Amino acid sequence: MSQLELGWPAMSDEALLCGLTKWLGPYLFGLSSRTDLQRINLAKIFEALLTWEQRRELDRCAPTHMAVPVASVSQSITAIPQLRPWR
């Protein structure tokens, strides 16, 4: 199934460029410097293009955070010398 069949908005480079003024334009109002542009949170803007149900499905399929057992994290850190925080 394609993104459109699932109801997801088209977010390819081409689709985003074609609709640039629609999805990004409102966030550019009042910006006057490069620093202002760097403060734009594109993840939040893209998230705003989704419905609540789509955001929920995205969080389910690709969570931004995961809980992992503490033991596995410390084992991973000690197994790779470059990642040892106490060195």
Image (spheres, rainbow, N blue to C red):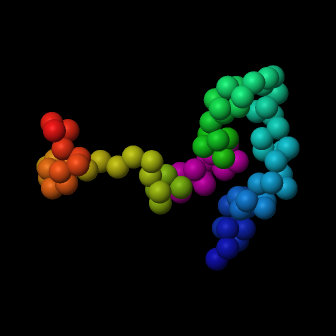
Closer to the camera, 49 or 40?
A: 40
Closer to the camera, 86 or 13?
A: 86
* Quarter of the image where the C terminus is located: top left
Q: Is residue 26 left or right of residue 5?
A: right
Residue drawn at the location 23% of the way across and 49% of the way down: 82
Q: Is residue 87 left or right of residue 5?
A: left
Residue 15 quadrant: bottom right
Query: Can residue 24 be seen?
Result: yes
Q: Position of residue 73 (x, y in %)?
A: 21, 49
Residue drawn at the location 78% of the way across and 41% of the way down: 24
Which residues are the magenta region?
Answer: 47-57
Q: Is residue 76 above or below residue 30?
A: below
Q: Is residue 65 left or right of residue 71?
A: right
Closer to the camera, 40 or 80?
A: 80
Residue drawn at the location 35% of the way across and 49% of the way down: 66
Query: Can residue 73 be seen?
Result: no
Q: Position of residue 30 (x, y in %)?
A: 81, 22
Q: What secondary structure is the magenta-colored segment mainly?
A: helix
Closer to the camera, 85 or 69?
A: 85
Q: Is residue 29 magenta?
A: no
Q: Is residue 21 above or below residue 17?
A: above
Residue 4 quadrant: bottom right
Q: Position of residue 1 (x, y in %)?
A: 64, 77
